Image (cartoon, grey):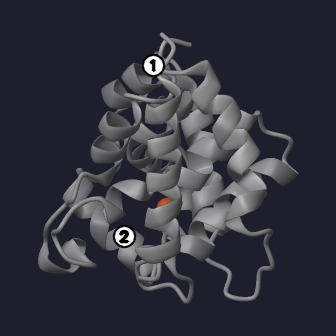
């Protein structure tokens, strides 16, 4: 389904506005803010030669934290903001599943990795370990096999690895505008891809 140019322009501007004005909050307990975290995630995906759709997913995976009014760190107050669902729902009006599904599954991917990789579990950051409890803890064996049957689960796991590494206060990345062409390509494909 093709969107009217105006609608596509609006969402592009809206995304830019969010990252330029609302992404200044600290990313969990890390030393980076949401904008740096987004740019590092997308840059790591780009360095690995991921498709443009996964660059966009990496860039926007935490937008769900910036489109609610539950405050800056709801997890601190024991509230799961379900940012992955919030983001996927919002973005699915404009982007295809190759962008929205890895985003929707990136929290499940953490629960998955905690179940299949003991090393991963032991290396979770303090805030990530805290939110894991709110998110349901490591997956059970049944949940693991169910997860592995989901389309885009492997892209979600890769996104999760970039997400986890994207907390480096000394990393240098391109600016947001570097990723605008990838956003435009994903928008031109639209939600029916
Ligand atoms: Fe993240």
Specify the farthest residue to the front: 6
Q: Residue at x 41, y 82 (%)?
A: 25
Left or right: residue 116 versus residue 79 is right
Seen in the picture, residue 146 relative to 187 is either above or below; the reply is above
The one nearer the camera, 47 or 186, is 186
Seen in the picture, residue 87 relative to 20 is either above or below; the reply is above
Which residue, given by chain and number where applicable, does mark 2 sit on? 129
SS state under label 2: helix
Left or right: residue 188 versus residue 190 is right
The one nearer the camera, 176 or 114, is 176
Determine if residue 54 is in view. Answer: no
Q: Residue at x 52, y 41 (%)?
A: 9
Badge 1 density bin: few <14, some 14–19, many ≥20, Cα 10 Å:
few
Q: Position of residue 110 (x, y in %)?
A: 45, 50
Q: Which mark is residue 176?
A: none
Q: Position of residue 49 (x, y in %)?
A: 86, 41
The one nearer the camera, 189 or 40, is 189
Badge nearest the viewer, 2 or 1: 1
Q: Position of residue 60 (x, y in %)?
A: 52, 52
SS state under label 1: loop
Badge 2 density bin: few <14, some 14–19, many ≥20, Cα 10 Å:
some
Q: Residue at x 20, y 77 (%)?
A: 71
Q: Position of residue 44 (x, y in %)?
A: 76, 57
Left or right: residue 34 versus residue 187 is left
Q: CA distance from mark 2 to mark 1?
A: 24 Å
Mark 1 CB in 8 Å range of ligand 1?
Answer: no
Seen in the picture, residue 67 relative to 11 is either above or below; the reply is below
Seen in the picture, residue 44 relative to 115 is either above or below; the reply is below
Which residue, given by chain and number where applicable, does mark 1 sit on? 150
Which of the image's four quarters has the C terminus?
top right
Left or right: residue 158 versus residue 87 is right
């Amino acid at each position: 389904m093709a969107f009217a140019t105006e609608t596509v322009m609006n969402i592009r501007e809206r995304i830019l506005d969010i990252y330029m004005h609302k992404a200044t909050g600290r990313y969990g307990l890390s030393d980076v803010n949401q904008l740096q975290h987004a740019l590092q995630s997308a840059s790591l995906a780009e360095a690995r030669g991921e498709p443009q759709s996964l660059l966009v997913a990496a860039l926007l995976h935490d937008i769900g934290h910036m489109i609610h009014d539950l405050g800056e760190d709801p997890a601190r107050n024991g509230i799961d903001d379900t940012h992955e669902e919030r983001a996927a729902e919002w973005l699915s009006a404009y982007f295809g599943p190759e962008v929205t599904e890895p985003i929707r599954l990136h929290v499940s991917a953490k629960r998955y990795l905690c179940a299949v990789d003991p090393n991963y579990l032991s290396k979770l950051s303090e805030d990530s370990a805290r939110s894991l409890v709110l998110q349901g803890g490591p997956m059970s064996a049944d949940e693991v096999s169910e997860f592995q049957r989901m389309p885009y689960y492997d892209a979600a796991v890769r996104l999760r690895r970039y997400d986890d590494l994207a907390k480096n206060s000394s990393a240098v990345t391109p600016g947001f505008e570097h990723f605008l062409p990838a956003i435009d390509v994903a928008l031109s494909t639209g939600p029916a891809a």
